Image (tube, rainbow, N blue to C red):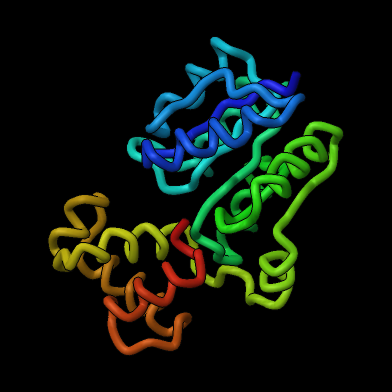
Amino acid sequence: MIRILLAEDQAMMRGALAVLLGLEDDIEVVAQVGTGTEIVPTAIEVQPDVALLDIELPGMSGLEAAAELAERVPGCRVMILTTFSRPGYVREAMAAGAAGFLVKDGPVEELADAIRRVLAGETVLDPDLAAATLRAAPNPLTSRERDVLAASEDGSSIADIAGRLFLSPSTVRNYLSAAIGKTGTRNKTEAALAARRNGWLA
C-alpha cells in the first residue's frame, strides 16, 4: 500500500480527497492535517510514502513544509496539490524538493496515477502549468525586495514595514522603488499584486 499524508486546510476538500484516494486498491491515507505546522511532526510519526500538500496553509506554507520534509523525512516524496497554478510556485516547489505539482481541478484518477509515478521516482507536473513555467520570466526580485513587498500587501506604511523588518525607512523606500521598477508598475500596491500574481512572493 502507498501511504499518504494529506495536508489541506479546507475540511470538506480534505475529507473528499481522502475518500476518493481511499477507493484506490493500492493507496491508503494514513494521516490528515489542516495546518502547515502539523505536516513535519505528523510525517515523522507516521512515515508516509508520499505527502500531498496544499500551498497556502495556516502556520506554514506547503512549500516551506516541503523543504523541511526533504531534510527531516527524506524517504517521503512530496507532491503539491493546489488551486494556485502560478509558474513561480512551480519553481519554488521544485527548489524545495517537491516531486510533483498538480492543480486541484483534475480527475482523481490522474492524481492517483501521479502519486504512483512520483513514488516510482518520476517528477510529475501539470502539463499546462509546466508549459507556462517554461514561458514565464524568472523571479527578478531579490529576497529583501520580496520581503518588503510582502510586508506592504496589507497596506502597511513605510514606517510600519521598516519597524517590522528592522530596516530604516529609506532602505524600505529603496527596496520598494526597485521592486516597482522590476514589476513595471506604478506603486507598491500594484507591485505587490503583480508579484503575487506571478508567484514571486510564494
Q: Residue furthest top?
A: 45
- Dividing the picture into quadrants, the one containing residue 68 is top right
Q: Residue furthest front?
A: 23
Q: Position of residue 50 (x, y in %)?
A: 67, 29
Describe residue 78's horizontal placement relative to residue 32 as left or right: right
The residue drawn where x is 57% and y is 58% is: 105
9 w.r.t. 144: above or below: above
- Dividing the picture into quadrants, the one containing residue 76 is top right
The residue drawn where x is 47% and y is 81% is: 182
The residue drawn where x is 59% and y is 53% is: 92
- Dividing the picture into quadrants, the one containing residue 89 is bottom right
Number of numbered callouts drawn: 0
Q: Position of residue 202 (x, y in %)?
A: 47, 56
The residue drawn where x is 48% and y is 47% is: 55
Quadrant containing the N terminus is top right
Describe residue 56's horizontal placement relative to residue 108 as left or right: left
Q: Position of residue 201 (x, y in %)?
A: 44, 61
**In this orientation, which residue lies closer to the viewer: 91 or 158?**
91
Q: Position of residue 140 (x, y in %)?
A: 55, 72
